[in-house]
Image: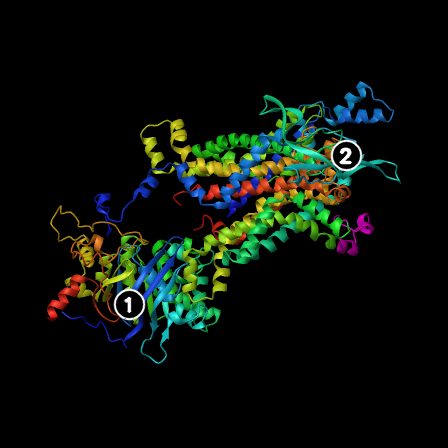
Amino acid sequence: MSVTAPPASVADLPLASSEKEDRFAQATQLQLTWWRFRRHRLAVASLFAVALFYLIAIFANFLAFSDPQATDARRSYIPPQAIHFSLSGGPAMWVPGLKGVRDMRTFKLIYTPDPSRHLPVRLFAHGYPYQLLGFIPTDVHLLGVEGAGPGDGIFLLGTDQLGRDLYSRLVVATRTSLSIGLAGVTLSLVLGVLLGGISGFYGGVPDMLIQRLIEVIRSIPTIPLWMALAAALPNTWSTTQVYFAITVIISLVGWTDLARVVRGRFLALREEDFVIAAELAGASHGRIIFRHMLPSFMSHVIAAVSLALPTMIVSETSLSFLGLGLRPPAISWGILLQDAQNVQVLANAPWLLSAAVPVILVILAFNFLGDGLRDAADPYG
Amino acid sequence: MLIYLTRRLMIAAVTCVAISVVTFIIIRLPPGDFVDAYISQLASSGSSVTADQAAAMRHDLGLDRPGVVQYFFWIAKVAQGEFGVSMLFKRPVAEVIGDRLWLTMAVSFAALMLTWILALPIGIYSAVRQYSWGDYIATTIGFIGLAVPNFLLALILMYFGFKYLGLSVGGLFSPEYAQAPWSWARLGDFAWHLPLPACVLAFAGTAQLIRIMRANLLDEIRRPYVVTARAKGLGETRVILKYPVRAALNPFASSVAYIFPSLVSGSIIVSLVLGLPTVGPLLLQALLAQDMYLAGVIVLLLGVLTVFGTLISDLVLMWVEPRLRLQGRA
Amino acid sequence: MRPIRMADRGQAILSVHDLAVQFPGDQYVVQALEAVSIDLQAGRVLGVVGESGCGKSVTARAILRILDHPGRIVGGRVVLDPGKPDEIDVTALARNDPRLLDIRGGRIGLIFQEPMTALSSHYTVGNQIIESVRRHSKLSTSAARDQAIKLLRDVGIPRAELRIDAYPFQLSGGLRQRVGIALALAGDPDILIADEPTTALDVTTQAQILALLRRLQRQRGLALMLITHDMGVIAEMADDVAVMYLGRIVEYAPVMELFAAPRHPYTRALLRSVPTILAAPRQRLATIGGAVPHPARRPTGCTFHPRCTEIIPGLCANEQPAPIAPGHAGASCFRVERALQEAAS
């Protein structure tokens, strides 16, 4: 027995649905998720941060100052140099040049910054050649030193032992580290959606088998396993082959989380009235999955992906840091951090740790983004 | 309860078998087999082996038979505690590993305990005093723990320890005890060195568990049974500790199942940075030298021990959770 | 017709005066209760009836000061033993005042709607009852256990000495609610608040639980506040009735009077919407037009006016009728006020 009854028509009610509520009622799942997501300021900021990181990755060579592979023994371990701005005689930028000093004990020529020499820095200067977006050959860079002599350059973050500019390497490494995360997550997603979907949609024996498989994979300590698999890669493989092999290795474990999310959503949705209605209406399995179920858990999957990405990136960084992941001449954050393994070296050249900063920032940004998306994924909740 | 127990033991057994298969595959992955490696080793020291001799060796070791047979050959030996000989160190694998495996487990277990001791009270505090300063500080630390991979944390600690304190942080023993046999003094020295690596390892897990505990407790605090407890006239502290905390403990306890493998994982890489005499550096050495017998055994033992650790924690969980204990009896 | 005094205030053992409760939110403040006044008397049953969301449960929780966050009492008083020298204003006690904790369970017992979720599944039934027995007495553990078994027998649980060691999830819904009642009685209170005690149960169990409540109330001389949305339950159980709508009491009257001559249009509408076997066959059941408005958008004027069929143009939509004075029967409605004025002149 109910005391209330639905109103005869919406118009009868002086306080009933305004225009806003209509908009809410007609919105798609993704729209609702987006509206809710916008309310999380930290998550929105993280979205911009992530977008910025990927922009850096896309335009890495344009943003780099000097060839990340170019070695020069003379400029080994140069500390970070600021870009100076001067306004006298019109706005201009300069960096100090280098001067050679002979160490009176070892008689070695050591190069140190010479603040008295001003090297002018120009916007859109010409530098080493590269292909913009992978197909436009150019040599224009955001900043560059005009009339650079041998060994001259902008060393915003200092140089490593072989005299390579750390800033340029860091920018180019962003490309590798972020793309390997993306590739790994894509592979995990395919595996996760496929296996999680089978598990959740069909249930029964396949579900049991897949669940056990996930349990087994999750109870194995991953790093030793990765290390062993990565070490087993033949030495003769090219950089690209290793890159893909490492991607496969890190997604072998990564798919389990995504499969769990997908399975959970399938199980929940299978009982929903609209799915049963579609089934009764004679819709095919494919149609039910792609037309009815997938849109309603898209946002959950997006959230799970954004939480899985940082794990992938850390995995690659860890492996490369150990010397078992990508191999030079590839540049990734893990490879850059490999140089910082030795405490003695680190004490003299602490700027080698700077690759830790983007790692931490990216993990944070993806996690905030993922948390925001996960909260927003239940728009009616 | 018996059903659950059987199921759980079955999963553990299947996992162990799966780990052994993966290990075996890893051992066989690099081109060439043990005999090839042995021959090239002998060649480097000047002696040589004929093709017949090599074939005889292969036959003795069972290397001329199909992979599946070889697997059973190998696993039977491992089950008897015969792990083979390390090519890198030219000594039996068991001898090379020695204490290292137990030190790895000790460090991981210490980190696990630390994770619990820290995360439980902080998580409760964070939930009960939601949006207080303490909660914000705990949340911030939680995010840092989430964002800084533990090898980076170890690296940063090493740098600051070296730069500002002038000491080399790391190791599990002082130099005078490093090679000494076990004694009370060595144990004391070990206990003194343990906290730093344990803290580094525990940091990420603690951060994660604080988040889990906070979220679960916030969930439980709004449940009607908490109102019932208040309506009984119980004090707020007793209400919180006896009822919602008890309920939130379950997901917390089961989280051990996935925290522990990641702690063992982490201990490998942190050991490398901090120079701990665990299996971590040994594994890396073995892998870089392609000494697959040694590496395989390390991976196998780590995996099996982790499965046992997880199994024990699950049994404890079953014992404290009435629903699981009484399953099928209601 | 003049406003009648419901009861001598000296007889009431719990008196709620002009109680107001708010739930402040991010965008708006929800006024959950407004000028609510009720009296509970020993040996009598007060039925509180209304649609979901009208503030029935909030009233119960406000009396015990166990409102969910962020709810808070912003006005009024809740007086225990009014008129006696040791009367206590519950709203004036500090949050951790030991007297407040003694009142919860010791003077006022609370029975919940959902017996499953209201009991913790991590402890046995006995553990949860004994805890409350010992909290409000000086009994030893074993004596408290005997007391708990006695309570379980009292509420009609067979084989109580075995069931005491059961976990709530091992019991049926009806047994669980009996445990809930035993739990509410564990501290030997003289006031019992039952918050929709039968809503989650099936019809036969409902009748049993109501009969049990009735028996316990009579045997122990309890003051019972019975919250329900079911007019049938009210007719069967209540001595007095408070009808609530959107956080206000719109009518307050002895039960016979309410059913015989309902004064507020809302009460009349509620009574019309009760199915009856006396109605002509195939007659449509009356419903109340419209829906309960969102709590954040309370109508101006009389809160019921958008759904009222007897609205006075220009008045009901703009001004609020006076609330029913504490300790009085009546209806909060301009129609009723006018009728009274006409009768007086």
Comparing B260 with C345, the one in front is: C345
How far, Cα to Cα, is label 2 from label 1? 86 Å
- Left or right: B79 with respect to A201? right
Give the total number of marks visible in the rendering. Answer: 2
**Label 1 packing within 10 angstroms: few (<14), some (14-19), many (20+):** many
> What chain does badge 1 belong to?
C
> What chain does badge 2 belong to?
A
Determine whether B258 is above or below C30 in the image. Answer: above
Residue C6: tell me if it is visible. yes
Determine whether C183 is above or below A276 in the image. Answer: below
| Region in magenta | B168-189
Determine whether B148 is above or below A72 in the image. Answer: below
The percent coordinates of residue C217 (x first, y second) are 29, 68
The dot on residue C240 is: none
Q: Which residue is mark 1?
A: C37
Disc 2 element: helix
Q: Are marks 2 and 1 in contact (CB under 8 Å)?
A: no
On whether residue B209 falls in the magenta region, the answer is no
- Name the residue rendered at 54%, 50% in the picture: B211
Q: Which residue is mark 2?
A: A75
Residue A249: tell me if it is visible. no
